[in-house]
């Protein structure tokens, strides 16, 4: 069979987007890994599936698989691409789109300038929500990694995040520490790892080592987690512009019990077809 797909990116975080509303396909872990291969397949950080909703109050179901083939709960850059895709594919003409995810419902809005505003939900800091092995909630926790102690913040944005504040993201040990923290025993479902540099109360730089994908050019939920933890620690004031290697996202978080809002672009790269056995 021929599978139709669209290649998209959000600030360089790239996706293969597949419409499973108008076509059918079974994509298991091995097949996703093959498709993710940048030499022998399509190549992507995440696969995004557009499916009919199970909840009649929702417009679509949004599913995300990392390059290693494992399904994950949320992806902010992917959510922006999802919103652009369903409009460009004429699956909907709505500008405000409600989708169901493993992490719960998301509301996506495509603005007049075609940037996408995403209601990312309320950040959660309780260790059991991440999940993270710690006796109590705190703005920071001490984590022993590679014979050293590191102060981290832990946040759930529907998926797990650890945030380390560093002096300079350009020299941060992302390649060395990222995989060690990702698979640390205190994170039973593994974790995305953000390396955060404070520029000003309204500006930051960030690099993210993503669970199951490695370092990516941008991570929307990672930007949300970094800003949420930074505001909680008194390092930021809303709104905050977060500069990632692939570009800039704007994050708004007016109050601790309010949803965080992410604003940024989404870009279509090309459409294609691939033969599946």
Image (cartoon, rainbow, N blue to C red):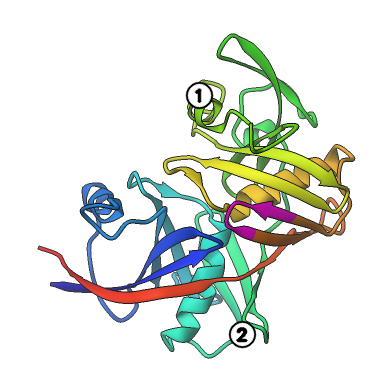
Q: Which residue is outermost to the top?
A: 147
Query: In the rendered structure, which segment of residues is drawn in magenta?
Result: 242-247
- Where's the N terminus, which quadrant? bottom left
Q: Is residue 259 magenta?
A: no
Residue at image position (27%, 50%) is: 37
**Residue 61 picture location, percent across and down:** 46, 68
Can residue 59 be seen here? The reply is no
Q: Which residue is mark 1?
A: 180
- Where's the C terminus, which quadrant? bottom left
Q: Which residue is outermost to the front?
A: 170
Q: Relative to the observer, which residue lies in front, 189 or 204?
A: 204
**Above or below 153: residue 89:** below
Residue at image position (36%, 75%) is: 270
Under circle 2, the secondary element is loop
Q: Quadrant of residue 156?
A: top right
Q: Is residue 124 left or right of residue 49?
A: right
**Residue 232 picture location, percent across and down:** 84, 41
Under circle 1, the secondary element is helix
Q: Relative to the observer, which residue lies in front, 258 or 234?
A: 234
- Mark 2 or mark 1: which is in front? 1
**Residue 25 picture location, percent across and down:** 23, 67
Q: Which residue is mark 2?
A: 95
Q: Which residue is outermost to the left?
A: 277
**Above or below 75: residue 139:** above
In three-dimensional space, the C-alpha distance between marks 2 and 1, rounded to whole angstroms, equals 41 Å
Tally the marks. 2
Residue at image position (60%, 71%) is: 265
Can residue 132 be seen here? The reply is yes
């Amino acid at each position: 069979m021929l599978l139709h797909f669209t290649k998209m990116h959000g600030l360089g975080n790239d996706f293969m987007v597949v419409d499973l509303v108008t076509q059918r396909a079974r994509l298991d872990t091995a097949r996703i890994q093959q498709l993710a291969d940048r030499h022998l397949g399509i190549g992507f950080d995440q696969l995004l599936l557009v499916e009919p909703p199970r909840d009649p109050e929702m417009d679509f179901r949004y599913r995300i698989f990392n390059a290693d083939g494992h399904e994950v709960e949320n992806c902010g850059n992917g959510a922006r691409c999802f919103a652009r895709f369903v409009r460009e594919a004429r699956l909907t003409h709505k500008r405000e789109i409600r989708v169901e995810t493993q992490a719960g419902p998301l509301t996506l809005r495509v603005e007049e300038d075609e940037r996408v505003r995403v209601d990312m939900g309320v950040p959660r800091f309780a260790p059991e929500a991440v999940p993270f092995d710690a006796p109590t909630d705190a703005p920071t926790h001490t984590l022993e990694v590679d014979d050293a102690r590191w102060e981290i913040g832990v946040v759930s944005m529907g998926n797990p995040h650890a945030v380390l504040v560093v002096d300079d993201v350009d020299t941060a040990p992302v390649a060395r520490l990222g995989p060690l923290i990702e698979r640390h025993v205190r994170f039973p479902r593994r974790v995305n790892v953000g390396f955060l540099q404070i520029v000003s109360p309204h500006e930051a730089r960030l690099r993210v080592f993503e669970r199951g994908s490695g370092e990516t050019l941008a991570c929307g939920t990672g930007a949300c987690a970094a800003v949420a933890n930074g505001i909680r620690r008194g390092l930021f004031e809303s709104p905050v512009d977060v500069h990632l290697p692939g570009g800039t996202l704007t994050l708004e978080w007016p109050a601790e019990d309010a949803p965080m809002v992410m604003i940024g672009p989404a870009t279509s790269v090309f459409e294609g077809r691939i033969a599946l056995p």
